[in-house]
Amino acid sequence: MTLPTAEQLPKQNYWAGLQGLYAHFYAWLLRRMPSERQRLLAVTIVAGGLCGLAAVAFHVSIMGLEILFIDRANAASGHSWIWWTIACPAIGGLVAGVGLTYFAPAAAGSGIPQVKVAYTLRNGEVTVRETIGKFVLCALQIGSGASLGLEGPTVQVCAGVSSMLARLARLGPRNSRRLASVGMAAGIAAAFNAPIAAVTFTLEELIGDLDQTMLSGVIVAAALAAVVEHSVLGSNPVFHVQGNFTLTKSSSLVWYAVLGLLAAIVSVAFTDSLLALRAWFRRLTRVPRWVHPAIGGAATGGMAVVALALFHLNGIAGDPYKTLTLALTGKMTVTAMAVFCVLKLASTVSSYSSGGSGGIFAPSLFMGAMLGGAVGYLDVMVFHHSADSIGAFAVVGMGAVFAGIVRAPMTSVLIIFEMTGGYGLVLPLMIANMSAFALARHWRRTPVYDALLAQDDIYLPHGGGPFDQGDIEHLPGMDLDTAH
């Protein structure tokens, strides 16, 4: 028998202590909740609260890093702000690339495809390493200036929290899978202040059917996560816009239909560009993979410099919602909005396709607002309507581009209502969103998340239909842990 060394002994005692603590906890849980259904209900309630806290911590971390890095880079003296604005996301991408390559490969990407894989193929299991990696590396990359959103990553972090609770409560495979949907709903509810849209998105994107037990858990978790997020960060909508958006003139419906068409074009252009550049980076084997996010970060920084030099506004690198709010209030010129739409598309494609960690929700809303505001100027010029309609078109544009890219038509309507309070735009939203959704699906049958997984040779059985061979480039050799 080999005795442990002095270095090994404390470690063994540590793990033995943790195992003993867990055994006592599980025995206590079984005495009070002998059935798995009872434990599922308890874990669902706890998951809603903990996911809300995790989402708040994630968002606060990103806000703090943006102040530390992006704001300082933009405010640097002389012409040095140019180099710092380019270097900041490049350095953040480099550090994140090392972490994504050697520590947590599954933390790359937006987070939604990873949760779909976990739900469908791994009974909802999201590892602790994946969860911690997503939290730390994504916060670092977005906080240093990557043109990516925090909403998809929040979903993956929350799914990781709910998966950990499922393992602690020793839930069976079926109920562990249900906890993945709970994590997704809680993440969306906390990220957008939108619990109703969180339920519909989980149904549209993940569950696909009306499992009564699963749906009940999703509703409870979304409500609890939203309550926690409201308690800490406030209960106001994401966008603070004075007044209510309404359809003032029925003749504007012509331009809302045009907006739906343009939103579909932007959506398909975004998805095609994202997949094409991502495939190009996969073939770029002469450069180490961990350097790729730095390349995308430098490109994003360069586009942020263009936006700052031309319009003295950011939103390309870092928090896009401040600039987006200007579009909703009609305080941006039509030229600025058109340029920002193009720059945001290019910068997000660069940040994401190079292997970064972050989502596409916020960028899609940003592009939609800029596109919608530009179309709103046409409505004002042609029909001489009030300039207030520019903000209304920006709101509808957000939902239309979101519907075209994410392909969640119900969520695209509800999430705009909850984020902006624009309930007076029901008809324009339905016209533009459904037009963008239908046209984008006609031109590109494969939704963006399924196409991204297909590039990794992962085809989920509950996916949205057959894949077009021309839509995607199949790259063999990818496994579930490295897919992003």
Image (cartoon, rainbow, N blue to C red):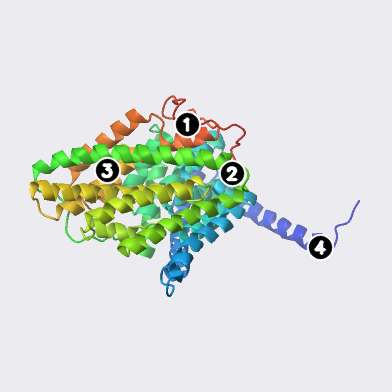
393 on left or right of 80: left
The amino acid type of the residue labelled 1 equals Ile
10 Å neighbourhood of mark 4: few (<14), some, or many (≥20)? few
The amino acid type of the residue labelled 2 equals Arg
Q: Quadrant of residue 25?
A: bottom right
10 Å neighbourhood of mark 2: few (<14), some, or many (≥20)? some
Dot 1 corresponds to which residue? 472
Which dot, 2 or 1, sits closer to the camera? 1
Asked if one can make out residue 129 in the rendered structure from this viewpoint, the answer is: no
**Position of residue 193 measured from the top left corner of the image (x, y, whole percent):** 34, 54
Q: Secondary structure at mark 1?
A: loop
Q: Secondary structure at mark 2?
A: loop
Q: How many marks?
A: 4
Proximity of marks 3 and 4: CB atoms separated by less than 8 Å: no
Q: Earlier in the sequence, mark 2 or mark 1?
A: 2
**Position of residue 482 measured from the top left corner of the image (x, y, whole percent):** 59, 42
The amino acid type of the residue labelled 3 equals Val
**Position of residue 61 measured from the top left corner of the image (x, y, whole percent):** 47, 63
- Whole-angstrom CA distance, mark 1 to mark 3, is 28 Å
Dot 3 corresponds to which residue? 413
10 Å neighbourhood of mark 3: few (<14), some, or many (≥20)? many
Which dot, 1 or 3, sits closer to the camera? 1
Q: Earlier in the sequence, mark 3 or mark 4?
A: 4
Dot 2 corresponds to which residue? 170
440 on left or right of 463: left
Which of the numbered marks, if any, corresponds to residue 7? 4
Proximity of marks 3 and 2: CB atoms separated by less than 8 Å: no
Proximity of marks 1 and 4: CB atoms separated by less than 8 Å: no
Name above or below for residue 310 compared with residue 476.
below
Q: Earlier in the sequence, mark 4 or mark 2?
A: 4
